[in-house]
Image (cartoon, rainbow, N blue to C red):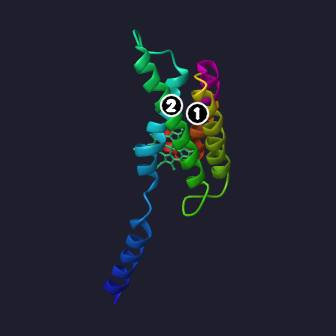
Amino acid sequence: MRGLVFSVTLLLVGAATAGEPDMKTIMATSVNPGALAFWAGGNDPPEDETPAQAEARWAAAVKGAQTLQAEGRRLAAAPYTRTGRWNDDARLMVETGAEGEAAARARDAEKAFEIGGRLYDACNGCHKTYVPRRE
Ligand code: HEC
């Protein structure tokens, strides 16, 4: 009997996670690359950057900012939402992502840098509270 209950539990956990990526996957494969691409818009351009490379860097920054908005919305909703400051940090990611998208479209590096700082507050705020090991 005990074995049966255990397998049923495993099945349920498997079903619950089958369609939904876990936090680690979302962070490593979507949020982190999206943020790096957006931050690259506000950073100094690489030396000898060609106009085509600049074009690609800004296009990636726009896309990254869009990813941050989508992921912020996802994290603020079930099954990811949590109590405490979680949703505020997720929403800050949506807001700075939206502002960041506009700045990246305008290729405004100074603005992108300023917004990038506030975006970092969202990452850091959430990690500080929910991922103490990464402080
Ligand atoms: C609303 C909460 C929240 C926000 C906002 C958030 N994170 Fe995370 N992040 C987490 C949690 C929770 C983990 C731990 C996941 C795990 O290991 O289970 C994590 C883990 C990570 C990791 C480690 C992934 C790995 O491979 O172990 C990276 C990198 C990361 N976050 C980057 C970012 C960046 C960059 C931002 C901001 C642009 C950000 N996160 C915003 C909650 C958040």
- Circle 2: element type: helix
Looking at the rendered structure, the number of numbered marks drawn on it comes to 2
Q: Quadrant of the N terminus?
A: bottom left
Q: Which residue is mark 2?
A: 61
Observer-nearest residue: 131 or 50?
Answer: 50
Q: Position of residue 73 (x, y in %)?
A: 60, 52
Task: Count neighbours of disc 2 (C-alpha within 10 A) and say few if under 14, some if 14 to 19, many if 20 or more.
Answer: many
Residue 120 bears which disc, if any?
1
Residue at horizontal 37 percent and vertical 71 percent from the top:
14
Question: Which residues are the magenta region?
Answer: 108-116
Task: Check residue 110 for magenta coloring.
Answer: yes
Q: Of the two numbered discs 2 and 1 on the same chain, state the one appearing first in sequence.
A: 2
Give the residue type at disc 2: Ala
Location of residue 54 by image quarter: top left
Task: Count neighbours of disc 1 (C-alpha within 10 A) and say few if under 14, some if 14 to 19, many if 20 or more.
Answer: some
Q: Is residue 16 above or below residue 103?
A: below
Q: Is residue 79 above or below residue 109?
A: below
The nearer-to-camera label among 2 and 1 is 2
Task: Check residue 72 for magenta coloring.
Answer: no
Residue 38 bears which disc, if any?
none
Residue at horizontal 52 percent and vertical 19 percent from the top:
43
Observer-nearest residue: 99 or 35?
Answer: 99
Q: Is residue 96 left or right of residue 2?
A: right
- Circle 1: element type: helix
> Is ligand 1 less than 8 Å from the beta carbon at label 1?
yes
Residue at horizontal 33 percent and vertical 80 percent from the top:
7
Q: Is residue 82 above or below residue 99?
A: below
Give the residue type at disc 1: Tyr
Q: Is residue 8 left or right of residue 61?
A: left
Location of residue 5 by image quarter: bottom left
Q: Position of residue 104 (x, y in %)?
A: 57, 28
Q: Position of residue 27 (x, y in %)?
A: 46, 45
